[in-house]
Image (cartoon, rainbow, N blue to C red):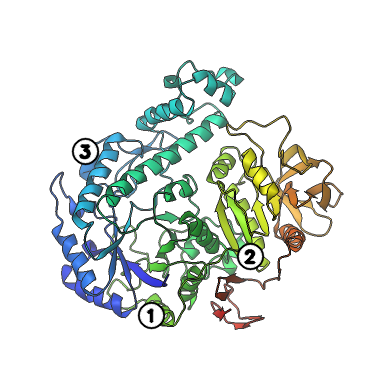
């Protein structure tokens, strides 16, 4: 697949007389794709039933005349103001019972039947009009599901839909639900599904089984909403359909939603994410303030390659300072080029910059684009031009299966967030910490969904923190030829959030390890390891006859191994994880190398890439990497 570039454009924001000039400049910059339309509902339909397609017709024609290909977005992330008059109860409700109303975006509840029908209506009108348009080469459903905490709604519509979902899940048997949830505790037993409320505004914490079920339901609502649009578009168009996921949004199952799509895309904002969601220390935030975390974007690249079953894009790439993070610095010169090539190294088909021109109005007026608000070039467009020239001689994307894989399970993330057992503990952060350790060892990684059972040709598989592990998954991992790393909290709960007791977790096949006790650790009370590093955040007491391969300074087992399986009962810091990865990576026969600070490598079937995310030049085995520098080696 050929690597291409694109941008996000809003013709409705600009005078029509400059559209053709914009299109020509996009073409001159080496861009191929232009995403439009995803926020345009009020322009298309300013009053109910009053449809104005003419401007969108001309915009698509103008872009297409320059040889640009359009990604057309359905506009359902921004229902117009009149929609609220038609459906005044369509808004989501937060956990405190407050309505999240009109005035920005994503102002709807996925469970509201009236808005669900409206979203189908506008999607059908758009698909019927543009499904055969030769310039519309791809579609995007909605925009950034889940962004701004908009997956879960505690509305009346959600309550009714949740009752229906529970009735179907438990085959109409309320006694089965009571038993599965342990509702005998605190006299929480229900006589009918209609008695079940939503798990908010309770005196103290609600039943964790109830919370987990509501999170699963809420995810399914997003999948159903998206599927309805996909079915309509596919009836009218053969162009591939995508959705743009957002960084560290885990409250719906992206794998499940992605099963209905041809392409997964995500929106990459390295500097904004470093400030508001990476989980970096203040020292790390300072060191990488103008470059972004060395691993956060890469993890998402690998995740969405899996969600898209090999086909994925960056739909929005940060080109300069953003407007929404606590602090919004500008990237180092060369970073936009590095971020672009990093995505291509992980298999991206396209990287699209957000946005074409900085808007001089409304909420995102401080968000940089490829052009300034006065239409002069902003710094990033020159880097985009450089990449476009480099792509002329670059080979096509040739992905290859990595030797290392991490299982990623959205359900596990919901389980951790339901019962973190310690302040700030999250499944995503645990995965990111393990991913970072693998990258510090110079490894290339695949992300796999939890439903995978075929692990052929992998040498090392990690399944940290997967709270519920079905028996067939445990058996498949035990039967694989790979070294497998579990824990902490792997296998700690059953499907309905009960602790298995016969035997106690993790109940792994062929690995004699039992978790006899758990504790979460204060930030100022880490437990030192004997050979350096520490356990922090979370620690389990391990028993069993498996070989002890990692111990505390006092000699208590932290990681135990039998055959090709290892269970780690602690959340290790960076030094501790580096030790553990060295032990099991060596056992797996992997070629490990200690990467310099900020330097990362990625191997494809035909190339090896080296990236310097640090602010200083670094000497490597393939040459000197300047700040924000990259070396691409053909294999």
Spatial CA distance of label 2 from label 3 is 52 Å
Residue 421, position as x, y percentages in the image: 64, 39
Q: At x 48% / y 15%, what residue is drawn?
A: 191
Name the quadrant containing residue 350. Answer: bottom left
Q: Earlier in the sequence, mark 1 or mark 2?
A: 1
- The mark found on residue 85 in the picture is 3
- Left or right, 218 with reference to 46: right
Image height check: is 178 above or below 520? above
Residue under label 2, please give it.
Answer: 439
Viewer-nearest residue: 370 or 464: 464
Q: Which element carries disc 2, helix, strand or loop?
A: helix
- Left or right, 83 with reference to 278: left
Residue 10, position as x, y percentages in the image: 26, 63
- Left or right, 523 with reference to 361: right
Spatial CA distance of label 3 from label 1 is 46 Å
Residue 310, position as x, y percentages in the image: 48, 60
Name the quadrant containing residue 391. Answer: bottom left
Residue with the most extreme right position: 555
For the residues labelled 1 and 2, say whether their Cβ atoms are less than 8 Å apart.
no
Q: Earlier in the sequence, mark 2 or mark 3?
A: 3
Q: Callout 3 environment at 10 Å: few (<14), some (14 to 19), or many (20+)? A: few
Residue 281 shows in this picture: yes
Residue under label 1, please give it.
Answer: 385
Viewer-nearest residue: 205 or 22: 22
Q: Earlier in the sequence, mark 3 or mark 1?
A: 3
Q: At x 66% / y 55%, what residue is drawn?
A: 461
């Amino acid at each position: 697949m050929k690597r291409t570039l694109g941008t996000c454009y809003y013709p409705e924001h600009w005078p029509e007389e400059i559209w053709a000039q914009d299109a020509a400049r996009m073409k001159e910059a080496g861009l191929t794709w232009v995403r439009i339309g995803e926020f345009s509902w009020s322009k298309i339909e300013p009053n109910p039933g009053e449809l104005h397609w003419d401007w969108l017709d001309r915009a698509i024609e103008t872009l297409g005349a320059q040889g640009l290909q359009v990604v057309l977005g359905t506009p359902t992330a921004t229902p117009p103001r009149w929609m609220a008059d038609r459906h005044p109860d369509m808004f989501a409700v937060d956990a405190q019972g407050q309505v999240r109303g009109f005035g920005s975006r994503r102002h709807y509840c996925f469970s509201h039947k009236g808005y669900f029908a409206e979203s189908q209506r506008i999607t059908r009108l758009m698909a019927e009009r543009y499904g055969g348009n030769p310039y519309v080469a791809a579609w995007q459903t909605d925009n950034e599901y889940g962004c701004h905490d908009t997956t879960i709604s505690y509305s009346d519509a959600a309550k009714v839909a949740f009752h229906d979902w529970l009735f179907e899940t438990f085959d109409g048997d309320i006694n089965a639900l009571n038993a599965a949830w342990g509702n005998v505790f605190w006299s929480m037993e229900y006589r009918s599904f209609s008695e079940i409320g939503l798990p908010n505004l309770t005196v103290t914490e609600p039943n964790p089984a109830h919370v987990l079920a509501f999170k699963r339901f809420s995810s399914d609502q997003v999948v159903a909403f998206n599927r309805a649009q996909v079915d309509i578009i596919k009836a009218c168009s053969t162009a591939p359909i995508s959705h743009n996921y957002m960084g560290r949004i885990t409250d719906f199952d992206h794998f499940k939603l992605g099963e209905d799509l041809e392409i997964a895309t995500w929106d990459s904002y390295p500097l904004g994410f470093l400030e508001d969601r990476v989980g970096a220390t203040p020292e790390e935030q300072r060191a990488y303030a103008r470059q972004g975390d060395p691993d956060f974007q890469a993890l998402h690249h690998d995740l969405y390659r899996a969600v898209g079953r090999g086909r994925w894009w960056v739909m929005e790439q940060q080109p300069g300072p953003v407007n929404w993070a606590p602090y919004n610095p500008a990237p180092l010169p060369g970073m936009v080029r590095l971020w672009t090539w990093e995505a291509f190294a992980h298999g991206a088909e396209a990287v699209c910059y957000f946005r074409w021109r900085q808007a001089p109005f409304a909420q995102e007026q401080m968000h940089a684009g490829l052009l300034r608000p006065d239409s002069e070039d902003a710094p990033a467009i020159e880097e985009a031009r450089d990449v476009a020239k480099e792509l002329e001689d670059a080979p096509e994307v040739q992905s290859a299966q990595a030797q290392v894989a991490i299982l990623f399970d959205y359900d596990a993330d919901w389980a951790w967030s339901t019962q973190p057992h310690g302040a700030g503990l999250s499944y995503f952060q645990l995965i990111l910490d393990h991913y970072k350790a693998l990258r510090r060892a110079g490894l290339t990684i695949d992300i796999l969904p939890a439903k995978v059972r075929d692990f052929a040709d992998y040498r090392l598989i990690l399944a940290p923190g997967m709270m519920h592990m079905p028996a067939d998954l445990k058996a498949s991992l035990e039967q694989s030829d790979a070294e497998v790393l579990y824990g902490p909290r792997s296998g700690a709960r059953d499907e309905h959030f009960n602790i298995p007791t016969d035997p106690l977790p993790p109940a792994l096949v062929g690995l004699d390890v039992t978790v006899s006790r758990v504790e979460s650790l204060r930030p100022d009370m880490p437990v030192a390891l004997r050979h350096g590093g520490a356990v922090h955040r979370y620690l389990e007491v391990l028993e069993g006859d498996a070989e002890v391969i990692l111990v505390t300074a006092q000699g208590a087992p932290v990681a135990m191994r039998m055959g090709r399986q290892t269970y780690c009962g602690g959340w290790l810091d960076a030094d501790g994880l580096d030790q553990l990865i060295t032990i099991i990576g060596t056992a797996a026969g992997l070629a490990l190398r200690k990467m310099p600070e900020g330097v990362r490598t990625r191997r494809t079937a035909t190339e090896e890439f080296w990236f310097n995310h640090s602010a200083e030049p670094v000497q490597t085995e393939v040459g000197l990497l300047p700040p924000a520098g990259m070396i691409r080696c053909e294999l």
